[in-house]
Amino acid sequence: MVKKIAEKGYIFLMLGLLYAPILMIIIYSFSNTNNFTFPEGFTFEAYVSLFTNAPKKLWDSLYNTIIIAVISSVLAALIGSISAVGIFYLKPRTRRLVENVNQLPIINSEIVMAVSFMLFFATLGFPQDRIWGFVRLILGHVTFCTPYVILSVMPRLMQMDPNIYEAALDLGCNPTKALFKVIIPYILPGVISGFAMAFTISLDDFIITQLTKGASTGIDTLSTYLYSSLRNASGLKPFWMPVFTIIILVVVTVVMFMNFRKAGKVHMKKGGK
Amino acid sequence: MKIKELPKTIYGKIKGFRLTRKVFSYPYILFLMFFVITPLVIVLVNAFLSDGQFTLNNFKDLATDGSSLKVLGTSIMVGIVTTLICLLLGYPVAYILSKWSSGSIIVILFILPMWVNFLIRTYALQTIFENVGITLGMGTVIFGMVYNFIPFMIMPLHTTISSIDKCYAEAAQDLGASPVTTFIKTTLPLSLPGIISGVTMVFIPTISAFAISQLLSNNSIILFGDSINLKFENKLYGVGSVMSLIMLALVLISNLFMNKINKGEAAKNLW
């Protein structure tokens, strides 16, 4: 009995430690400061200033973050799903080789990936302007997002009955048509969860974006703008606290939804048996 | 006659290229070679280049540069301490959750904070330390690392421990082993693959972490990841590339080791 209470206490203590800093941000976003004090008492001032006189740079960086995440995750989902099918049907040895290279962006340290992209774009002489800045970032993000799509599509392919594809061919489909009519619909759940993962990872990325964006392209995403504000000696402006709060709430809702939907499905499957 | 047959043979040749399913992987293989392999090769080449000449000077520079070696030493020390604390704090969490029926849902709660951008979480920690009056330094850096990376320890441990067959522990107890002996002789050895994945998944990100140690030590402690970035900021491409290669080698060695032990399960567990 005592042991059970101790165990519960330990889990709650650890969860408490893990969530305390995040909760502090949410609570003190109503204090109109950049730290954890309430000099003016409870106030919505910071939220008001976020929507009335936050710098244009904040909205620009939010816009860039979303544009880059949408384009890269859509590209990653398209490239990833078609390539996963191809990789699945390679000869075993080639397949293992390609899968290992595909793992590289996932296992590699972000800083090494970032540095390698930076040198790559510098060597190729990518121009330092806005448009090419976007191209760099999207290429970089597609490179580290696509492997996740492939990893989430592969299990679906392994579950698929190979006879369905053969049946489509026997009934007169050419391979391309069979791919789009049979295989793609079957792997769609894997593609969607891969897309969601790619989108979240791209939104969240800081290190690769920071080093790949190019020194003078003038592009900032939310995370790189936050980093340069953090390094600024004057400290963060109070409007950042509501920004953090909104990000935290959005992320938590989306991830909870994705995870519990998955957990619910597994549960239903078990119940069905 | 011959001229008439010519189009046919060309057509035959094109037809010989069959659009099988594996062909769909060819564009991506090119993509990987161009955007994953080539950048790493450029890093490799840069490690051997100095003033446009092929030399080993960059390696020599790094090996004789006291401050870089100190950074490497500090990083390994911080990495080891962080990993040990994560293991000591994370193992009980994974062990307790594996006994609960709701464990697999609660483990999601432990992973959830990871999705909040690490800059935000690090800023929150920094502010708490400042409010409480703790001076930023080695202690706060290690706290921040543990805070950031402990989910990477709990995840693989939870997966491994909850897949251990309960019969082993029961058998040990039936044969008269005390709870402690049972744990040491059955659960602990059987969870070794999880421990190894967890240790790798905490140690590598810790030493290559970027910005965390800067923010939590007022720029007084620089770790390997930050140091690579600084080298490139100061245009020391050669030495920076050598350091990146060292990091890459560490990643590859630890992954090879991890794959040998649990046959690629760890990467899947991540998601």
Image: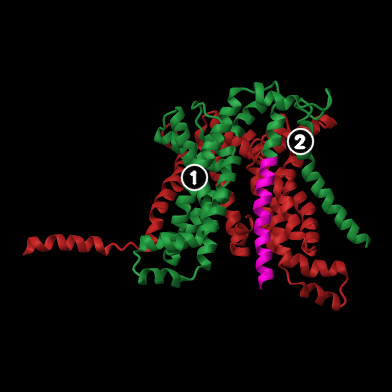
Chain colours: A green, B red
Measured as percent of width and height from the top left, residue A209 is found at 55, 36
Q: In the rendered image of this protein, does residue B74 appear above or below residue B111? A: above
| Residue A79 in sight | yes
The C terminus of chain B lies in which quarter of the figure?
Answer: bottom right
Percent x, y for residue B44?
47, 43
Considering depth in this image, is B175 or A229 the residue closer to the camera? A229
Left or right of A262? Residue A112 is: left
Q: Which residues are magenta?
A: A249-273
Mark 2–mark 1 contact, CB under 8 Å?
no
Residue type highlighted by circle 1: Val
What residue lies at 39% left-to-right and 57% top-to-bottom?
B24
Residue B195 appears in view? no
What number is the disc on residue A26? 2
Q: Residue at x 74, y 55 (%)?
A: B107
* Residue carrying label 1: A142
Report in which chain the residue with disc 2 lies.
A
Q: Residue furthest bottom?
A: B175
Examine the residues drawn in magenta and state their main secondary structure. Answer: helix
- As drawn, the residue found furthest toward the left would be B1
Q: Position of residue A95 (x, y in %)?
A: 45, 62
Give the residue type at disc 2. Ile
Q: Report whether B235 appears left or right of A46.
A: left
Q: Nearer the viewer, residue B124 or A123?
A: B124
Q: Earlier in the sequence, mark 2 or mark 1?
A: 2
Disc 2 on helix, strand or loop? helix
Residue at (60, 29) in percent of width and height: A225
Tag count in the figure? 2
Q: Please tell me whether residue A263 belongs to the stretch shown in magenta.
A: yes
In the image, is residue B110 above or below residue B67? Answer: below
Q: Is residue B197 magenta?
A: no
Q: CA distance from mark 2 to mark 1?
A: 32 Å
